[in-house]
Amino acid sequence: MSTLSQAYRDDTITSRHIIPLDFDSIDGVPESHLWSPSEEPHQNIQTQDPQDSLIPVIDLSDPRAMDLIGQACETWGMFQIINHGVPLELVKEAESEARRLFALTTQKKRKVLRSPGEATGYGLPRISPFFPKCMWHEGFTIMGSCVDDAKVLWPHDYQRFCDTMDGYQNQMKLLAHKLVLLILHRLDVTTEEMNWATSTHDSQGALQLNSYPSCPNPSRTVGLAPHTDSLLLTILHQSGTNGLEIFVEGLGWRLVCPIDGAFVVNVGDLLHIFSNAKFPVVYHRAMVNHSMHRISAAYFHGPSVESMLAPSSSSRPCFRSLSVKEYISLKARHNDKALSLIRI
Ligand SMILES: O=C(O)CCC(=O)C(=O)O
Ligand SMILES: [Fe+2]
């Protein structure tokens, strides 16, 4: 049976930029990383006042949580959650282990470089080939066990990293299932569809650790270019530094303020399709700043890659049905054009 990592492996586009910059050895932004407004479609739209975040913050212990989540999915496709039940200690530990990883020398990190045809390891964002300039970013992708890479990075001290990332992925998987259940109440789903979306034993997840070093020229650089996440939903921990922005039709780019102990949750393409576009497609990006090294951890949750996906109980579906694997493949080849290719 295919796994998410096989599906990603099959479709990696060979990129001329697969190696993140050696951030330790540079003192300016090289031409390859300098974006002009015309190269970044939304770059010139002003971000709103940082205090004025639109995205709702929902307390999962609130009896109205299900309704609030449903409304947020329909209106923004994004919300933040607090009182989610994930031990905050574990979140802090995962962030600190991610910092320990990115603080390694460039030479060390490149030993676990994600080569073309590989799904996990150290590297640039998967969307890099679709943009003319490189992003001010380095990432580390984990799907299941990361022990092989960790042994290369810390031959005598790899267990701490692995245990933390395993524990974090387990908690994310539990939380993702809880959220999917709450979200599906907003949609008119059949029992069979409910089983598909909530089946725990063959759901798939990937953990993406993102690092955005401080940048000498943040107004001409992009941390993570505008994109949508491919799977059902994403649960993001952003360290206390601004950077994540969501594109809202008619309003432009809006900051998603970091809140201590909260996770940002956003609808991914598969959920957009499954909701028959009742939930919007969520464009977001990450910007960088002059003084802070920003870290984030995104957990992408999806169903089995072998399973079929179609708009739920819809008399007038606006997408054709296809396998999850096929969608991942379309996305890898066509990026944000993938949804229009399956629209009917
Ligand atoms: O770093 C962030 O805030 C966003 C990360 C993200 O969008 C992703 O990893 O897909
Ligand atoms: Fe994302």
Image (tube, rainbow, N blue to C red):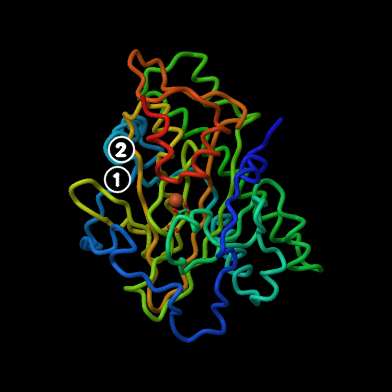
The residue closer to the viewer here, 335 or 151, is: 335
Quadrant of the drawing holding the C terminus: top left
**Residue occupying the point 46% across, 66% down:** 135
**Mark carried by residue 72:** 2
| Residue 156 image point, x, y percent | 81, 68
Q: Amino acid at mark 1?
A: Pro
In the rendered view, tell whether residue 299 sits above or below residue 294. above
The residue closer to the viewer here, 167 or 112, is: 112
**Mark carried by residue 247:** none
**Residue occupying the point 59% across, 67% down:** 19
Residue at the disc numbered 1? 56
Quadrant of res 214:
bottom left
Side of 304 relative to 320 (left or right): right
In the rendered view, tell whether residue 44 sits above or below residue 266. below
Q: Judge the density around disc 2: few (<14), some (14-19), many (≥20) Cα neighbours within 10 Å.
A: many
- SS at badge 1: loop
| Residue 119 image point, x, y percent | 64, 50
Q: Judge the density around disc 1: few (<14), some (14-19), many (≥20) Cα neighbours within 10 Å.
A: some
State how far apart marks 1 and 2 are (Cα): 7 Å
**Residue occupying the point 62% across, 64% down:** 97
Q: Are marks 1 and 2 in contact (CB under 8 Å)?
A: yes
The residue closer to the viewer here, 205 or 123, is: 123
Quadrant of res 241:
bottom left
Q: For the view shown, which residue lies furthest in the left direction? A: 250
The residue closer to the viewer here, 108 or 173, is: 108
| Residue 343 image point, x, y percent | 37, 28
